[in-house]
Image (tube, helix red, strand yellow):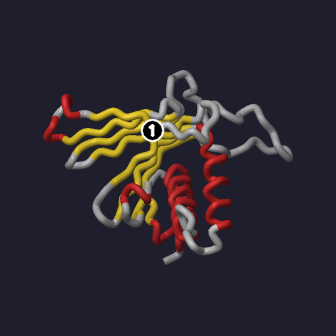
Amino acid sequence: MILFAAANPVRVMASGAIDVNHKNEVYDGQVPDIIDNAYVIVEFDNGSRGMLDLCMFAEGSRNEQEICVVGDIGKGETFVPESIVRFGKRTEGRDGVVTIMAEDERIKYQGLHHGSSYLEHLNFLSAIRAQGASGPSVNLSDGLLSVAVGVAGQLSIEQGRFVTMEEVLGL
């Protein structure tokens, strides 16, 4: 979301719960505290907002992931594992929507995150082998901010309020 917004997150509001997954599991005498569904709103310093609709028990549909970006110019959306990308401009209406297939031949079969972990490992290996000639897709700051957004979302769910990134990052 941070990469799409090309901005820094400012505050997070979330609503979520543990409703289905892992409720009957016990590890070291404790039930896992994994939130399996949530709505998370992230506000950025450039005025844009993003929303994550998380549901870890909604396998009953064609796509595991649906990513949508909407703005004043138009809309873009993608569906995984169908590998469909659809985009259009507001000025062109429904007739101007373009649909393309965005298949990656490195993915040998559809399922479970559609090879994302495998592809991340390939990209990481490529960055290491490049010995500094080319950098990774994301850096340490990107990782830190992503984790901080998750922590802010968790705190927001627990406390029922907006949580600022300053709070989480200790700024």
Secondary-structure class at tag 1 = loop
**Residue type, label 1:** Ala
Q: In this view, does 52 lie above or below 96?
A: below
Residue 53: x and y in percent read 46, 40
Residue 46: x and y in percent read 30, 64
Judged from this view, the residue extending furthest toward the left is 91
Residue 23 relative to residue 120: left or right: right
- Badge 1 crowding class, 10 Å Cα cut-off, few under 14, some 14 to 19, many 20 or more, is few
Residue at image x 66%, y 47%? 118
Q: In this view, does 78 lie above or below 4?
A: above
Q: Nearer the viewer, residue 33 or 101?
A: 101
Residue at image x 54%, y 35%? 55
Where the N terminus falls, by quadrant?
bottom left
Residue 67 relative to residue 81: left or right: left
Residue 68 relative to residue 167: left or right: left
Residue at image x 43%, y 59%? 2
Q: In this view, does 149 lie above or below 118?
A: below
Q: Is residue 133 above or below residue 66?
A: below
Q: Quadrant of residue 155?
A: bottom right
The mark total stands at: 1
Residue for badge 1? 102
Residue 111: x and y in percent read 62, 31
Q: Which of 93 and 14 is in front in this view?
A: 93
Residue 21: x and y in percent read 66, 33
Q: Nearer the viewer, residue 143 or 81?
A: 81
Q: Nearer the viewer, residue 106 or 169?
A: 106
Residue at image x 39%, y 37%? 85
